[in-house]
Image: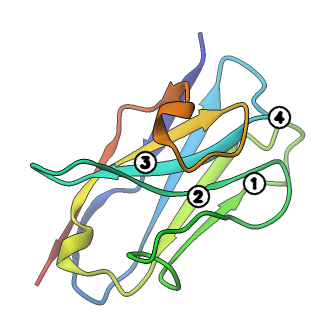
């Protein structure tokens, strides 16, 4: 059974940084696009970006562009870990952050068939 497990969430002050990690297990996802989706309390889910086997993270929305960066571990054969580096955090970044994986690039969150359980990020003002 495939699992995506996020880690690294927590409480941070505005202007601070956090790095989330997501590790895949149970199946080789090296051909999958892996990315991040967040959902703030009472709001719709928001696509944050994605990354393929190689190349940079792409698809960042304006709300995080220039502050968030997605990278993927290339040191292992399976490239099974993806990271979300979040800088200059704002209170409006407070949300549950989900790791997702899908077979193709898409900004449509419904295209991602695999989801982690999420990790809470809280940014205090």
Which marked residue is nearer to the observer: mark 2 or mark 3? 2
Q: Quick one: label 3 or label 1, which is nearer the N terminus?
A: 3
Q: Residue furthest right?
A: 77
Marks 3 and 1, Cα distance to the nearest angstrom? Answer: 15 Å
Colour scheme of the rendered structure: rainbow
Mark 4 / mark 1, whichever is N-terminal:
4
Looking at the image, do the residues carrying marks 4 and 2 touch, with CB atoms under 8 Å apart?
no
Q: Nearer the viewer, residue 22 or 95?
A: 95
- Measure the C-alpha gap from mark 2 to mark 3: 10 Å
Dot 4 or dot 2: first in sequence order is: 4
Cα separation, mark 4 vs mark 2, equals: 17 Å
Residue plotted at (54% across, 26% down):
114
Mark 1 neighbour density, 10 Å: few (under 14) some (14–19) many (20 or more) = some
The disc placed on residue 83 is 2
Which residue is under mark 3?
7
Residue 82 sits above or below residue 13 on the image: above
Where disc 2 sits, the SS reads strand
CA gap, disc 1 and disc 2: 8 Å
**Label placed on residue 22:** none
Q: Which residue is mark 1?
A: 73
Q: Are marks 1 and 2 in contact (CB under 8 Å)?
A: yes
Q: Nearer the viewer, residue 75 or 86?
A: 86
**In the picture shown, does residue 110 fall above or below 66?**
above
Q: Position of residue 56 (x, y in %)?
A: 76, 67
Mark 3 and mark 4: span between their CA atoms? 22 Å
Q: CA distance from mark 4 to mark 1?
A: 13 Å
User: For numbered disc 3, what is the local secondary structure?
Assistant: strand
* Residue plotted at (59% across, 9% down): 1
Q: Earlier in the sequence, mark 1 or mark 2?
A: 1
Label 4 Cα crowd, 10 Å radius (few <14 / some 14-19 / many 20+): some
- Mark number, residue 31: 4
- Residue 117 position, x and y percent, is 36, 32
């Amino acid at each position: 059974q495939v699992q995506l497990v996020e880690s690294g969430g927590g409480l941070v002050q505005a202007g601070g940084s956090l790095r989330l990690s997501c590790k895949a297990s149970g199946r080789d996802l090296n051909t999958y696009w892996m990315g991040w989706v967040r959902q703030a309390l009472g709001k719709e889910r928001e696509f944050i970006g994605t990354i393929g086997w190689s190349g940079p993270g792409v698809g960042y929305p304006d709300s995080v562009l220039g502050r968030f960066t997605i990278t993927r571990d290339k040191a292992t054969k399976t490239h099974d870990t993806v990271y979300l580096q979040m800088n200059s955090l704002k209170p409006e970044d407070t949300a549950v952050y989900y790791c997702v994986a899908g077979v193709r690039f898409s900004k449509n969150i419904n295209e991602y068939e695999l989801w982690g359980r999420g990790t809470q990020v809280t940014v205090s003002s």
